[in-house]
Image (cartoon, rainbow, N blue to C red):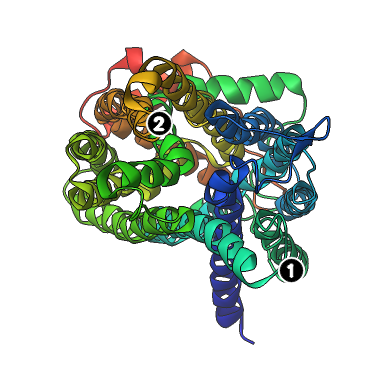
Amino acid sequence: MGMCSRSTFNKVFAVAILTAINFLNYMDRYTIAGILTSLEDTTANGFKINGKPEAIEDWQGGLLQTAFIGSYMLLAPLFGYLGDRYARKYIMSVGILLWSAFTLLGSFSVNYWMLFGTRLFVGVGEASYATIAPTILADLFPVESRLRILSIFYLAMPLGSAFGYIIGAELTQLIRMYTNQAVPWRWALRVTPGLGVIAVLLVLFVLVEPKRGHSEGQRTGKGVQGETGITAYLKDIWYCLTTPTFLLTTIGFSAVTFTTGALAQWAPLYIYRVSYVVLGADKQYEKSTAALIFGGITVVAGIAGTLCGSELSKKLGKKTRKADAIVCSLGMMLGTPFLFLALVVAQYKILYLGWVFVFVAEFFLCLNWAPVAAILLYTIRAGRRSTAEAVQILMSHLLGDAVSPLICGAISDSIFAVIGPVQGVQHGKAISLEFGLLITAFVCVLGGGAFLASTLTVEADRKAVEIFNSKANHSVQKSAHVDYVPPDAADDFDERKELLADAIKDKDIVSVDYKSI
């Protein structure tokens, strides 16, 4: 195999295996949502306390997702530090094995709190993958082709999420129908662990890890590598937090994760409850049908939105370097009213129109998956991208889906306590969960504003990284015989200001608001 064909194979394989693992990641994450109706059924969950069936309320169902996201986001900074300094494929492999093992262990849970504990450790494993995989793709592909590659990688999110619902609900239903299993939901959690082990073997023995910064010219020695030690890591974090575009897009992305996290956890149960109100007890959807409908909507809207967002950014990018930020803000602003309408029309028993609104809302929300990832990768330097991914994971989940399922569940329980005696159990539960989910529309408005603000800063931050890469590559060319570790230049305000002033002098950019640097 020639050098060119081997290089092409390595790139294609990396995209394929990393996307497949991302698919498993989201499939595993949202299988819980698919089995939630079974977990809340005391006759089907298999949980007991003091010999009596254990009942699970809405807030506890939300807490399962919060447990996973909590450990996932809190451990992300650790893996961000490791990912900028050590061999990334070994770190990923350990994480994949960890999440697979605890997902399997969760299927043997005898009570709610044992399942809760396993979800904590699943989050630890997934944190190692999410902080590192996008940086490997960034090192394999230059900025010009990166957006399309990222759109392929992030297609795994809607696909994996939808399959998680479907596997959780449909497999549980099939096992209940055709076997004598008393607690069929356990088998839904046993699908991804075996596939995870296969993925680890492929990563360890086939995946070729590129040097950090390879696609941007850093090809000598070990490539760009961060300094070790807590002081160096704190400096990396400070660099990320003082990059305005990174901070604004992270706030915007937090609104996305808040909304998608709440919908992922509660939408199937909401559809099930609303179907009783709209169709009546005799025509109410099966629990698995509710999950299947939402899963189908999610996968189609997710694929269409992710691909359209990528292509729209590429076309708009020919006219402005703000394209990715513009697409992100448009997605949030256009999706918000449809999300609100999707939840409200249920009150008027227009069920099928609600599905149309859900589809349109999810389509617009998914426009920003690839662009927001691309923004991070070209406004943050190569040696700090795993750290940036980790900080973004921490902030977006801390403010987003770590709390949104719990908040929505708590609002639902509180409202039901008031209206339940008046409306009745079934009608009251549907209305209360609707009000719990309405908070997502208001959060989306805030996220759209943050993305819109990032259009004012993205050009300057992107240019600063390009200037740094240009100077670093020039240094490499002058001293190619030594392993190059780029200088820690432009870390303080004055140096970053000086770099951008040079760009203005060369007419690369027109002006810079130094207060935003």
Mark number displayed over residue 198:
1
> Residue at horizontal 76%, vertical 55%?
93
126 lies above or below 444: below
344 lies above or below 398: below
- In this view, the residue in front, 25 or 244, is 25
Quadrant where the image shows the C terminus? top left
| Cα–Cα span, label 2 and label 1 | 42 Å
Q: Secondary structure at mark 2?
A: helix
128 lies above or below 144: above
Residue 309, given in percent of the width and then of the height, sits at: 28, 52
- In this view, the residue in front, 105 or 430, is 430
Q: Is residue 480 left or right of residue 204?
A: left
Q: Residues within 10 Å of mark 2 (few under 14, many from 20)?
A: many
Q: Counting residues from the N terminus, which is met first, the one under dot 2 or under dot 1? A: 1
Q: Secondary structure at mark 1?
A: helix
Residue 210 quadrant: bottom right
Give the residue type at disc 1.
Ile
264 lies above or below 144: above
**Is residue 300 in view?**
yes
Q: Which residue is mark 2?
A: 429
> Residue at horizontal 41%, vertical 39%?
263
Query: What is the residue that sits farthest to the bottom in this orientation?
Result: 1
Give the residue type at disc 2.
Lys
- In this view, the residue in front, 410 or 236, is 410
Residue 395, given in percent of the width and then of the height, sits at: 52, 25
Q: Is residue 509 left or right of residue 300?
A: left
Residue 365, given in percent of the width and then of the height, sits at: 31, 43
Residue 158, given in percent of the width and then of the height, sits at: 43, 55
**Is residue 218 in view?**
no
Q: Residues within 10 Å of mark 1 (few under 14, many from 20)?
A: few
Residue 147 quadrant: bottom left
> Residue at horizontal 29%, vertical 60%?
304
